[in-house]
Image (spheres, rainbow, N blue to C red):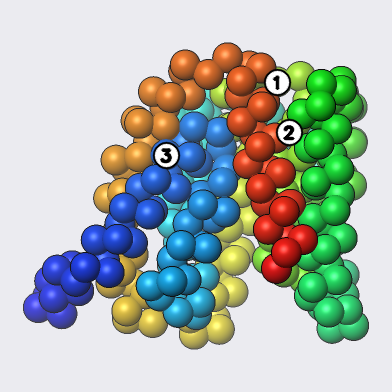
């Protein structure tokens, strides 16, 4: 208890709490982006071996809270296809990681994302893929990226932009994929011994930020029109693509 209190009083913990709160607001507003917002900043204050399992816990918490809030909006049929294809893609991603440099994989995904988002933001008509089976290649890509560089989000977000869903359905459906996928990641971290006492203590201290961010993001989400929601989504996704290109 004394060690937990001492950790809570450290300036670094206060900064981490603030970063995770802002990241949670972004996640609660558009359904993703908390990792993109938080990890680059957190690595200035914490080691990557602590940031990765910590944000996996935070991301899982955010996914659960959003899924509870918008569970009635989830489109479960494409989620099943996404998860099935992702499970097939993970082993290939691991194999690619063995034979290809991580930079090459990042560059390939980043180039696709930048091209896709630039096309959409330039006013081009976003591609609409109505059949749920179209989720398969996106889920497979998410599995490959997850196995290779733990980046499952961009292909799933890209798939959501091809669907004629309102913002609440888009956010909810993404959580339907992210939560079970995140649980697998958490399990792998636990088995790998990444759940150290410091990681667990920090998570306990910053977890309230997720709950505080939820209503703030919900408030902002209600004030985003469908067109603005799409633009915001493409901008965040474009940022992810640029980061992958320059990593």
Q: Nearer the viewer, mark 2 or mark 3?
A: 3
Where does the C terminus fall, quadrant-wise?
bottom right
Check contact, mark 2 vs mark 1: CB within 8 A: yes
Where does the N terminus fall, quadrant-wise?
bottom left
Q: Residue at x 48, y 40 (%)?
A: 26
Occupied quadrant, residue 198: bottom left
**Callout 2: few (<14), some (14-19), or many (20+) C-alpha neighbours within 10 Å?**
many
Does 70 sit above or below residue 235?
Answer: above
Identify the disc placed on residue 25. Answer: 3
Q: Secondary structure at mark 1?
A: loop
Q: Residue at x 47, y 16 (%)?
A: 223
How far separated are the C-alphas under marks 3 and 1?
21 Å
How far separated are the C-alphas under marks 2 and 1?
8 Å
Mark 3 vs 1, N-terminal side: 3
Q: Residue 188: horizontal and vertical position, in percent?
A: 59, 74
Mark 2 vs 3, N-terminal side: 3
Does 243 sit above or below residue 81?
Answer: below
Mark 2 vs 1, N-terminal side: 2
Identify the disc placed on residue 165. Answer: 1
Does 132 sit above or below residue 206?
Answer: above
How far separated are the C-alphas under marks 2 and 3?
20 Å
Q: Secondary structure at mark 2?
A: helix
Query: Badge 2 is on which residue?
Result: 160
Occupied quadrant, residue 103: bottom right
Q: Residue 191: horizontal and vertical position, in percent?
A: 54, 81
């Amino acid at each position: 208890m004394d060690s937990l209190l001492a950790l809570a009083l450290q300036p670094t913990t206060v900064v981490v709490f603030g970063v995770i709160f802002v990241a949670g607001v972004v996640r609660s507003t558009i359904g993703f982006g908390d990792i993109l917002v938080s990890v680059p900043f957190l690595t200035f204050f914490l080691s990557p071996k602590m940031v990765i399992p910590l944000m996996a816990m935070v991301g899982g918490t955010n996914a659960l809270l959003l899924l509870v809030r918008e569970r009635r909006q989830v489109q479960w049929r494409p989620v099943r296809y996404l998860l099935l294809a992702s499970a097939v893609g993970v082993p290939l991603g691991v194999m690619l990681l063995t034979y290809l440099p991580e930079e090459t994989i990042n560059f390939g995904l980043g180039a696709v994302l930048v091209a896709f988002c630039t096309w959409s933001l330039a006013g081009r008509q976003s591609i609409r893929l109505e059949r749920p089976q179209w989720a398969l290649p996106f889920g497979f890509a998410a599995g490959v990226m997850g196995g290779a560089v733990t980046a499952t989000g961009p292909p799933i977000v890209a798939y959501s932009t091809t669907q004629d869903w309102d913002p609440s359905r888009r956010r909810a459906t993404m959580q339907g994929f992210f939560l079970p996928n995140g649980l697998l990641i958490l399990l792998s971290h636990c088995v790998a011994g990444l759940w150290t006492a410091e990681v667990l203590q920090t998570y306990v201290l910053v977890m309230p930020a997720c709950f505080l961010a939820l209503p703030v993001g919900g408030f902002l989400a209600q004030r985003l029109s469908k067109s603005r929601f799409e633009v915001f989504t493409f901008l965040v996704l474009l940022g992810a693509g640029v980061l992958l290109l320059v990593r």
